Structures are given as structure tokens and as C-alpha cells.
Image (cartoon, rainbow, N blue to C red):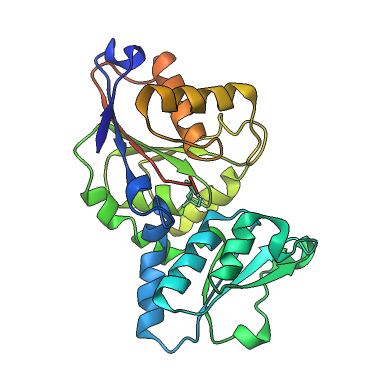
Amino acid sequence: MEEIFDECWNSKGIQVFVKRDDLIHPIISGNKWRKLKNYIQTFSLNEHSGILSFGGAYSNHLFALAFVGHSLRIPTVGIVRGEELIITSNPYLNQMNDWGMRLHFVARSLYRDKEIPSEYENYLCIPEGGYGSQAIDGMDNLVHELPSCDAIYCAIGTGATAIGIARATSVLVTGILTLNNRAEIEDHLKDFPAANLKLDDKYIFGKYAKSNADLETFCRDFYEKHQIAIEPIYTGRMFYALVDHIKNGHIAPDSKLVAIHTGGIK
Ligand SMILES: Cc1ncc(COP(=O)(O)O)c(C=O)c1O
């Protein structure tokens, strides 16, 4: 836990702590290991031949899975969205291939069906982005590592991290959506209820991964002030929202906030 200081919140007696999960590991950082660890355990207890999952060309989740496979000598397969891609399309795909992940590039229409090629039927399948009950359950330990506080802030992609955190605590969790998937997250909440998770979709900045000068400047200034790197896709949006909430008076004076740094800097 690291406390960060700024006139903007210190003047209101508000304390902001950052849970530095980004420091867990240089590659399987942030929520990645927490989301994967129960799947890895399932793999080691069962008769699967490997682990397969789905993601985009820049997926932090597939990247982490490829590294885990390489480190633990588990065969891995990545089904990647976009038939136009090749292994050298970006350095991450290249690295995943070097770590031994078998990459299959599929057309967007086929990708939607999440079909598993027949040769991998015996593989343990982790849903897209690492979402699933095992990922949600993987957040238990994180919550035990947090101090008592009034609210927790967390970025939302698939929702596994924020839902898992909210289910393991009674503290209010503010989940900052990073893409237009509120309906999908609300569906997940029917399967995994968490009444203390409040969704905020005001910081999507148009669509997933879209940035703008304001957000970019915010991330740069944040690093200069606090020496903590954040990126515009997840943690940048989450901290932007947190600061905005404080500025707009949504946070009661003298509150203690914890922001989860879910990593993503690779
Ligand atoms: C850095 C980072 N933060 C937050 C998230 C969102 O996590 P989740 O998909 O569990 O909502 C992701 C997506 O996996 C991510 O890569």
C-alpha cells in the first residue's frame, strides 16, 4: 500500500492509498496473476493437456498467460481476434510466440463464437480476458491485503476483478468502466451478485482504448507527481475518475480511499 498526496484531496482531509499490485511481477502484474492462479491450480489438478484462452492483439491477459505457460512449462494456446494478424504484427504477439504460445488468428465473426479448435478439446479453457468464477474467486487474497477504508476504486474490463473484490468485502467498490459494456457487467452481476459494486460509465472516453490529450496529460502528470506509472486504457481512466469524483465533491471529507493498481504496463 502506498499513500499518495495531492492538495486536491489533502485539503479535504481525504486520504488516497494505492494498492500496488502492479509490483507483483514485471509481466504477470496487477490483476493478471490473481485472475490466473486458480485456473493454473485447476490445470495442475486435472488431466488437461494445456490451457487455451481468447483475446485481442494487445491482450494483457494472453500476454500473462503466455508467460505463465513458458515459466511453468504448460502448453498454451491463444485464439486472437483478427485474421489479418501475423506473429510479427506487434512485439507482444512476437514475444508470446517466443514463449511458446500457439497463436491462432481468427476472423472477428468467428471469434465471436469462441469456438475451440478440435485439437484443443482437452485443453482447459479460460474465457476471454480471463473472466470467470475462478478469476472472481482469485480476488479474495487481495481484499485481505487491504487496510480498512471507506471506498475502493477499480478499473473494469470484463468485470472479474471488481466483482471479485466487491464480493470479498462489504466496503463500497466503485468500478470504472473502460468500455461500453455496462449491460454485460450487469449480467455478470446476476450470476455473481455484489450489491456494494457501483458502476460508473462516465469515463469511457468514447470507446475502449481510445485516448485523448486530456487523458494522456493526466497519466503523464500523475507519474510526475507520484512516480507511479499508469496507462490510459485501465488505470489512467480509473485514477482520472477518482480525482474527478474528489473534485466534484462526490467523496465525503476525511474519507479514506484505496485505488487498486491493476498493472497493465508492459
Ligand atoms: C491493467 C488492467 N486493469 C484492469 C483490467 C480490468 O480487469 P477485469 O477484466 O477483471 O475487469 C484489465 C483487463 O484485464 C487490465 O489489463
| Camera-side residue of 65 and 150 | 65
Expressed as whole percent of the image width and height from the top left, the position of residue 154 reads: 41, 40
Residue at the (38%, 60%) spot, across then down: 33
Q: Residue furthest left?
A: 148
Residue at the (53%, 70%) spot, across then down: 99
Q: Is residue 173 above or below residue 38?
A: above
Count the numbered circles shown.
Answer: 0
Q: Is residue 241 above or below residue 183?
A: above
Expressed as whole percent of the image width and height from the top left, the position of residue 261 reads: 38, 41
Q: Is residue 82 left or right of residue 190?
A: right
Residue at the (56%, 30%) spot, across then down: 203
Q: Is residue 165 above or below residue 242?
A: below
Q: Is residue 163 left or right of residue 118?
A: left
Instruction: State which quadrant residue 245 falls in.
Output: top left
| Camera-side residue of 138 and 191 | 138
Expressed as whole percent of the image width and height from the top left, the position of residue 30 reads: 39, 50
Q: Residue furthest bottom?
A: 47
Instruction: State which quadrant residue 172 falls in.
Output: top left
Expressed as whole percent of the image width and height from the top left, the position of residue 129 reads: 54, 58
